[in-house]
Amino acid sequence: MALAPLRAERGYLPLEDHGLIGDGTTAALVGRDGAVVWLCAPRFDAPPVFCRLLDAARGGAFTVAPDVIVASGQRYIDDTGILVTEMQSPTGLLRVTDALTLRSGADLTEDAPAGRAELLRLAEVVEGSVDVRIEIAPYRGAAATEARGGLRLHCPARPELELWLTSSVDLAGMQRTVTLRAGERLHVALRFRCAHRHRRVPPEALLAATAEAWRRWASRIRYEGPERALVRRSAITLKMLDSFESGAVLAAPTSSLPEVIGGTRNWDYRYAWIRDAAFAVHAFRRIGLAAEAWGFLGWALDAIERDGRPKVLYDLDGDVPPPERICAELEGYRGSRPVRWGNAAVDQVQHDVFGEIVDCAYQWASHGGEIRPSLWARLTPLLDGAAREWRRPDHGVWEVRSVGRPFTYSAALCQVALDRAWRLAERHGLPGDVAGLRQEAEEIRRAILEEAWDPRAGALTAALGGGPLDASVLALPLRRVVPADHPRMIATTEAIARGLRAGDGLLYRYLPGDYDDGVATSDEGAFLLCSFWLVDNLTGQGRIDEALALYGQLCARASPLGLLPEQIDPATGAFVGNFPQAFSHVGLIASGVALSRALGRRAERGGGEQRAAGEGAAGAR
């Protein structure tokens, strides 16, 4: 592992200097400085216990580290969610291994909790001697009392939450420094949610059981294409954003990380978006993770069947998240206010949900799932909505907070709803006007190609009737609305690659100055998923070498741990936006699979041509 000096600014490490650990119920971010700076308990969308990520002075953290750090580095134990941080002090090298532990024998494909509600930190001195500082400081404070061989932490702001801190060294309070020499170790465990246990399990056994559960799950990943190690790590990262019990996949485990430092584009992403379902399911299925695909589909369809009216996003249980509110206490990452809890997009009108939901049902049925009459009855009004609403303004895939418009992507997903519906009805004998649905789907496709086309820009644009360039149009071939090699899609690909270029393979999703999105600050980073969509279009157009080169550039931007953010600052290469971002990892996997298949087809053609040439030569002889 390569060690490097820390680069903190005003007490904040770069986002890329953090690793993710998770147990399918919650997740934590651990910095290269040995501090857990983000943990929500008892689950992903609960209030944070530690959030120094959003306020270096007041957010609180859980630190196990040398008093002085000269350099540090991080790595994952192969094919697991267990993180190792090595920190060099002036007198020795400390290794800290972190895990949100899993039950012994846990099957991560089951729709059941696998975590022990326990954050385990195992510290060992590799060489020399190190003064190891142990400090736990929950957000908004806590009082510690000695109990049952450890500390019981009472958080006045969270009276319902019990925290227990146990350690192999005596903890008289919430801060202590211990001197360890080479070969010596200590462990500290923070337990929450029904946390106290009389039975003690050695920390090494807990780590071994956790590693075994992760490796058993990872053995199911099927991928041998470009950037194999990074694709596998992306799959594990997505699994750490997966609610094992419900099947929901979070957009990100964090809230309010800014899309530009000092800006106000700071959103809470600790929820599950329906549109993520279709993209994530495609990615999961293509690398052998059928259980996750089925789990997410089941969660999405359960939410719709229970609620009846489609929402843009849901909490982990498929319920409506709380209203968005601003937290005045926290200054935000590197002073980027505001910090938000909840997401107002839940109340927006976004017509693409019609297509996202029906496509989920289509994928469910295509792989053996049953479309019950009750579910079909829930889906049928969505078809009416898609046919009625596709020309009407909405807030679109980018969830603008301005007056809506008839976005091209939204119309395209209405087309997807009707297209998948007639196929479902025809294949499974479901009631419906197959011919009428097919005709309406084709009408929307024609309208997109004609009305979203701007001959001056030489591209399909953001909205029906024209508008600025919008990288979401690159998703049309992925949703099988317009083929990647359609002349207008080829031209659109070129126009977006040129007009939204942020440099070095990066794309803006749109240019805020040309695109009224209702947010006061105009700047933002380059949106990683859009660049992966560009890879997919180049692949679909047969430009495989270009696609492969771009894919390599994008993968090289992953952190040393293989993690990706929502966005990249084009000027500095720094990570911005919520982190790690599920959509970015979904894009990395999906583009890798598409490239792998294209390379395979090209190899087959090359082999066929060689065989034909050999047979021709043999005939000539």
Image (cartoon, rainbow, N blue to C red):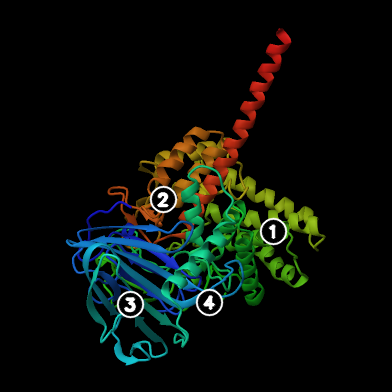
Q: In this view, does 132 lie to the left or right of 30?
A: left
Q: Which of marks 2 and 4 is in front?
A: 4
Quarter of the rendering occupied by the C terminus: top right
Residue 144 horizontal/vertical position (percent): 30, 89
Q: State the SS at label 3.
A: strand
Is 391 rendered above or below residue 447? below
- Position of 185 compared to 454: left or right? left
**How far, Cα to Cα, is label 4 from label 3?**
20 Å
Which of discs 3 and 2 lies nearer the camera? The answer is: 3
Q: Check disc 1 and report the residue beneath it.
A: 362
Residue 227 percent coordinates (x, y)? 48, 45
Q: In front: mark 1 or mark 2?
A: 1
* Occupied quadrant, residue 171: bottom left
- Whichever of labels 2 and 4 marks the residue nearer the N terminus, that label is 4
* Badge 1 density bin: few <14, some 14–19, many ≥20, Cα 10 Å: many
Q: Are marks 2 and 4 in contact (CB under 8 Å)?
A: no
The amino acid on which the numbered mark 1 sits, given as a three-letter code, is Tyr
Residue 442 point in image, percent of width and height: 68, 48
Considering depth in this image, is 217 or 499 the residue closer to the camera?
217
How far apart are labels 2 and 4 at the CA level? Answer: 29 Å
Marks 4/1: CA distance? 24 Å
What residue is shown with label 2? 510
Query: 613 or 77: nearer the eye?
Result: 77
Instruction: Say which label, 3 or 2, has the lower sequence index.
Output: 3
Question: What numbered label is drawn on residue 320?
Answer: 4
Report whether residue 462 is seen.
no
